[in-house]
Image (tube, rainbow, N blue to C red):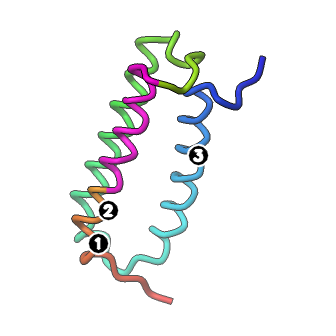
Amino acid sequence: MNYKYKIGYIKDYTASILFLTVSILLYFIKDLNKLKKPIILILILGFIIDFSFTINPSYHFTIMGYNTPTYIVFGGFLLFLIIVIIFRKNIKFTF
């Protein structure tokens, strides 16, 4: 079975990369108190996306296209980008 275009595979692959990236970025952020709201919003968003795939196991094997699982994944990614854009001024890195 080719998992390359299955939306469940794409969701898990993207989540893994974002989790690793955010973990590395959080290490270098100066003040985490200013980022409490966006971190909580992103965690809730990730939980909602994962929970929707948990209660509907058939979503994992759905091919990417014009269907509910694809809308959930890409809608969640769009909301993630909107949250990052809204709170971008609160992010200060220390190198």
- In the rendered image, which residue does mark 3 sit on? 16
Which SS class for mark 3? Answer: helix
Q: What residue type is labelled 3?
A: Ser
Residue at mark 2 to residue at mark 1: CA–CA distance: 6 Å
Instruction: Determine the residue positioned at 57% across, 56% down.
Output: 20
| Chief SS of the magenta region | helix
In the image, residue 94 sits, relative to residue 85, either above or below, namely below
x and y percent of residue 10 in the render? 58, 35
What residue is shown at x 70% (from left), y 31% (from top)?
A: 4
Q: Is residue 50 left or right of residue 88?
A: right
Front of the two marks 2 and 3: 2
- Look at the picture and state if 95 lies above or below 30: below
Q: Is residue 67 magenta?
A: yes
Separation of disc 3 and disc 1 at Cα?
Answer: 22 Å
Task: Decide if residue 36 is on the left or right side of residue 69.
Answer: left
Task: Name which quarter of the figure residue 68 lies in.
Answer: top left
Q: State which region is magenta.
A: 66-81
Label 2 residue SS? helix
Percent position (x, y) of residue 92? 35, 82
CB-based contact (under 8 Å), mark 2 and mark 1: yes
Q: Do the residues labelled 3 and 1 touch (CB within 8 Å)?
A: no
Which residue has dot 1 on it? 88
